[in-house]
Image (cartoon, helix red, strand yellow):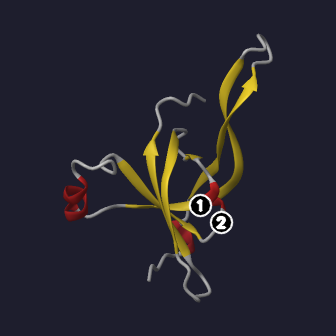
Amino acid sequence: MLKYKPSDFNRKAQFGSVQEVPNPHTDSPQRKFVADATLRYAPRTRTMTQQYSLLGTNLEDTIIIVTRHNKVTSNSLVAQLADGKYYDVIGSSPDESNNIITYDIVTLKYNKSIKG
């Protein structure tokens, strides 16, 4: 079971999707991030053994964050973290236990194609 203090969740992430919206100046479509929800998260680091086991897989360049259990993380396609960069949600591991406080471990991969 994961144990976190409330002070560990000191960063905000926006979860949402990328939609094509018209540019107000040229009316041409542009891809823009549209946020559905804002959640607080705690960054999580991997051990060296975990890093080595991911080498050569499609999860090699991913990061992990922890959020309070919320259905938004499983439905979202894109997340914008506190650093202002956009990440694709690769996977969400929800905690479906009967505990009062549960957490989701969300795996993210940097997306270079989305511009602010």
Viewed as shown, does residue 79 lie left or right of 93? right
Tell me the quarter of the image containing the N terminus: bottom left
State which quadrant residue 24 falls in. Answer: top right
Q: Which residue sits at x=19%, y=64%?
A: 49
Front in this rendered view, residue 102 or 30: 30
Relative to residue 69, is residue 38 depicted above or below? Answer: above
**What is the x, y in percent for residue 45?**
35, 61
What residue type is disc 2 on? Lys
**What is the x, y in percent for residue 19?**
69, 34
Classify 10 Å Cα crowding around label 1: few (below 14), some (14-19), many (20 and above).
some
Q: Are marks 1 and 2 in contact (CB under 8 Å)?
A: yes
3D distance between C-alphas at marks 1 and 2: 6 Å
Relative to residue 74, is residue 25 depicted above or below? Answer: above
Q: Secondary structure at mark 1?
A: helix
State which quadrant residue 27 falls in. Answer: top right
Q: Which residue sits at x=46%, y=51%?
A: 108
Disc sitting over residue 37 in the figure: none
Classify 10 Å Cα crowding around label 2: few (below 14), some (14-19), many (20 and above).
few
Q: Which residue sits at x=75%, y=27%?
A: 21
Q: Which residue is mark 2?
A: 71
Q: Secondary structure at mark 2?
A: loop
Q: Which residue is mark 1?
A: 74
**What is the x, y in percent for residue 109?**
43, 46
What residue type is disc 1 on? Ser
